[in-house]
Image: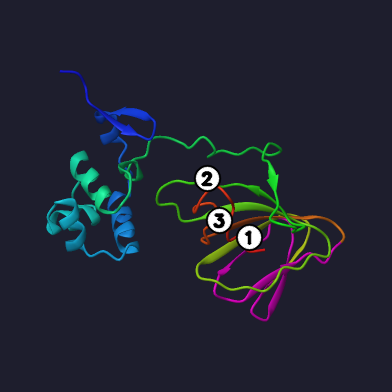
Amino acid sequence: MGSSNLTLGKANVPLERAREALVSNLGALIRQERQRRGLTLVQTCERARVSPAFLSLIERGKATPSLGSLAGIADALGLPVSTFLQVGLNADAVTREGERPTFSIGGSVLRYERLSTVFPGQQIDAVMIHVPPSFRANTISHTGEELIYVVSGKLHQTIDDTTVVLGPGDTCHFRGDSPHSYANRGKALVKVVWVGTVPVFRSGGQPQGIHP
């Protein structure tokens, strides 16, 4: 009998390889996706046709599902089974200095370089922001968190009523629900790496939700 294959996107992956490719945090990822959809264990199990006790063990990392059971769980959550398989790096997982295309949003003077890719269970997005002289961002707040790393220049970062000056190599990590903004008060371009939990690329190919 020939070996069976599992279709992942456009590729056929041998079942033996797929079993080895289960993501290491499988149970936590299943629980996260279930809770994100507001489903209880019982509701998910009814759709997936597995027992609540078994799914509970999977979510706690105490049991490993067969590919058939995993496919049922994925279907119950409205996801492709590939969500729970790690089959290598995305084509755009690695970016190179000087090779990343830049983009802007509408008529904004800010320019961005995309640093992050998209994959199932992803929690963060990242961009390089080119902040021109005399630019000041609007004050905003949102759920989640942000971390910024200054690559070059000096950035004035304001969080609540506190303003700090960040130079090359400096970082700032803060809650997104704290009112925050930033400014380039100098005469030279400032380059900043922004990492955040606000979905930017995860909702599709076009950037959305970038702070500035």
- Residue 66 visible: no
User: Mark 3 touching mark 1, by CB under 8 A?
Assistant: no
Furthest residue toward bottom: 161
Q: Which residue is mark 1?
A: 148
Q: Earlier in the sequence, mark 1 or mark 2?
A: 2
Q: Earlier in the sequence, mark 2 or mark 3?
A: 2
Which quarter shows the N terminus?
A: top left
* Mark 2 surroundings within 10 Å by alpha-carbon count, few (fewer than 14), some (14 through 19), many (20 or more): some
What kind of residue is marked 1? Ile
**x, y (%) of residue 98?**
71, 38
Q: Nearer the viewer, mark 1 or mark 2?
A: 2
Q: Nearer the viewer, mark 2 or mark 3?
A: 3
Q: Is residue 39 magenta?
A: no
* Mark 1 surroundings within 10 Å by alpha-carbon count, few (fewer than 14), some (14 through 19), many (20 or more): many
Q: Which residue is mark 3?
A: 200
Image mark count: 3
What kind of residue is marked 3? Val
User: Mark 1 touching mark 2, by CB under 8 A?
Assistant: no
Furthest residue toward right: 187
**x, y (%) of residue 52?**
14, 59
* Mark 3 surroundings within 10 Å by alpha-carbon count, few (fewer than 14), some (14 through 19), many (20 or more): many
Q: Is residue 171 magenta?
A: yes
User: Mark 2 touching mark 3, by CB under 8 A?
Assistant: no
Q: Quadrant of residue 157?
A: bottom right
Q: Which residue is mark 2?
A: 117
What kind of residue is marked 2? Thr
Give the magenta range.
158-186
Label 2 residue SS: loop
